Image (tube, rainbow, N blue to C red):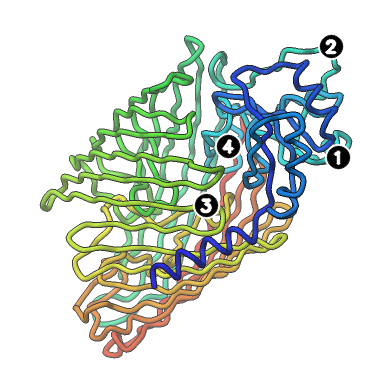
Amino acid sequence: MKIILILFIFIIDLLASQYSIIAFSTKNYDEKMAKKFISRFPNGIVKQYSKFVEYKIEPFKNYKEAQKFLPNVKKYYKYPLIIKYNPNLGKVLYKGDYEVVSNNYKPLLSHIKNNTNSYNHSWEINNTEVLKDINISVKDYLKDVSVNVNILPKKVNKLQNINECNLTGSDYNFYIDIYANKYDAQKDKTKLYGDKENLKLGFIYYKYFWNRWKFYTDDRIILKRDNKNGNKNYNSYLDVNELYIRNYCYQTNFLLGRKKTKDYRSWWYDEYLDEVSLFNENNLLTYNLILATRINNLTNDEDSKSNLKDYKYLIAHLNYEYYYQHNLGLFYLYENGLENDNNFLGIRLYNDWYWIDLGIHKGYGFDIGLRHKYNNFIFAGSYAYGSENFKQPYIATNRSDYLNKNFSFRYYGEVLDPNLSNLQIFSLYGLYDFDMNSFILALHKYDQIKQKNTIYNGDYFYSSKSKDIGSELDILYQYLNNQNKLKLGLGMFIGGSAYDYLQQKQIYKLFLNYRYYFK
């Protein structure tokens, strides 16, 4: 069965690919050589990576077409190679009669205003974003409002390097964040309902100094109201969300302070921790070594895991991008909490259309899924399994934007939101984007591996009486632009036979989140 699955993935990947021919590569850029190469191959392009410059011809519709063209390249260059086509790989140095410089990287809080996570592709130089498509003309670039480029005359030979190695200055922003939800929860004599609201008044500030260093902080005053089972609670406090210093552009970088630390899918960790971190983010082989704790309890109102004070963590993550957007990752996580010490081992394999997470801790668990994009639609399906004794780390949230880079949500269910332990989950996702709007439809089916009296969420769920936990349907909407974000969600959990003894086994959750940035 495993061999069949591997062959299936390989064949699908092969059929879906376009191809490029690499004629040769050098360590340094040579304009004269680039002009000669472009004159020989109209569809040629010169691109720079972290450590070398490639001279390549692309794209070809399939491997056979690339192979047919290969003799033309061998006339001039001795050892050309056929590889898969990667439209966003590297920085364009020379294309025809123009030098093209990417000016799309905006360090001034743009990633915060968009409320998106910025990914640092190790294929790119100094985290500079690249042009979206290297195979269209310069005129087409100018028509694309999503790409901001400078077209330089032939006389300009030196490329600009837009990165965070030599930045200076500072900037700040204020924001208002409103969150509210309403539950119609499972009912018995003791638990009736729950809802809450909070208002956050925040301040973000950063400053670059000493050319390669940055100070960053995100602080807010939080006003909140909780209503659980009829017991209302009002509170207000100051929360230091993030506060750290870090450096850039060294082989090994350093970070000290409080930071949101998360892995790509939040399957292993996703929390605001007080940490010392050593990491490399600019090569094909990246690593992150973190020593962390929490000197006070979390005050993140969207996360029920609020008691992390004095927990201790050692996190090691090694990732190799062996091909563009094809990644192999290894994880080790040590958690010293209120209970016994826990050790977690894991492996991750993913690219743009599939992912596999495998974890070991007193048992094993895995999550495997497929993703397909068609125009503005994204379709995905996954199967997750956690054996009887397996559990994810306490700081795993299963909240991620890996299906849609602009939209973070709880991909195991906004209502149930379970830890993957003694559980299997079948999930289907449909996503649609247009302009600044996104819709997500997610369907989940939950079953226990071994029938136990398991409480999946201490606030709103009860001991189960069978393996049939139930199903959940989530409908999510988000509006997102540079200055504000509006997110709405409706989650409906339909309890299975495990909850037949309750007065009401269905749960409905409606939530709203609005954030606005200003100065």
Residue that carries the numbered disc 1 in the rendered image: 140
Residue that carries the numbered disc 4 in the rendered image: 111
Q: Residues within 10 Å of mark 1 (few under 14, many from 20)?
A: few
Chain-order first, disc 2 or disc 4 = 4
Toward the left, the furthest residue is 340
Using the image, determine if residue 288 lies above or below residue 393.
above
Q: Secondary structure at mark 3?
A: loop
Q: Which mark is residue 155?
A: 2
Viewer-nearest of discs 3 and 4: 3
Chain-order first, disc 4 or disc 1 = 4
Tell me how far mark 1 sits from mark 3, CA to CA. Answer: 28 Å
Tell me how far mark 2 sits from mark 3, CA to CA. Answer: 40 Å
Viewer-nearest of discs 4 and 1: 1
Toward the top, the furthest residue is 210
Chain-order first, disc 2 or disc 3 = 2
Q: Residues within 10 Å of mark 2 (few under 14, many from 20)?
A: few
Q: Amino acid at mark 2?
A: Lys
Q: Picture coordinates of residue 496 (x, y %)?
A: 35, 86
Q: Picture coordinates of residue 178 (x, y %)?
A: 51, 50
Viewer-nearest of discs 1 and 3: 3
Viewer-nearest of discs 2 and 4: 2
Using the image, determine if residue 425 lies above or below residue 346.
below
Chain-order first, disc 1 or disc 2 = 1
Q: Picture coordinates of residue 461 (x, y %)?
A: 29, 73
Using the image, determine if residue 311 lies above or below residue 388.
above
Q: Residues within 10 Å of mark 3 (few under 14, many from 20)?
A: some
Tell me how far mark 2 sits from mark 4, CA to CA. Answer: 34 Å
Q: Amino acid at mark 4?
A: His
Q: Picture coordinates of residue 296 (x, y %)?
A: 24, 38
Residue that carries the numbered disc 3 in the rendered image: 351
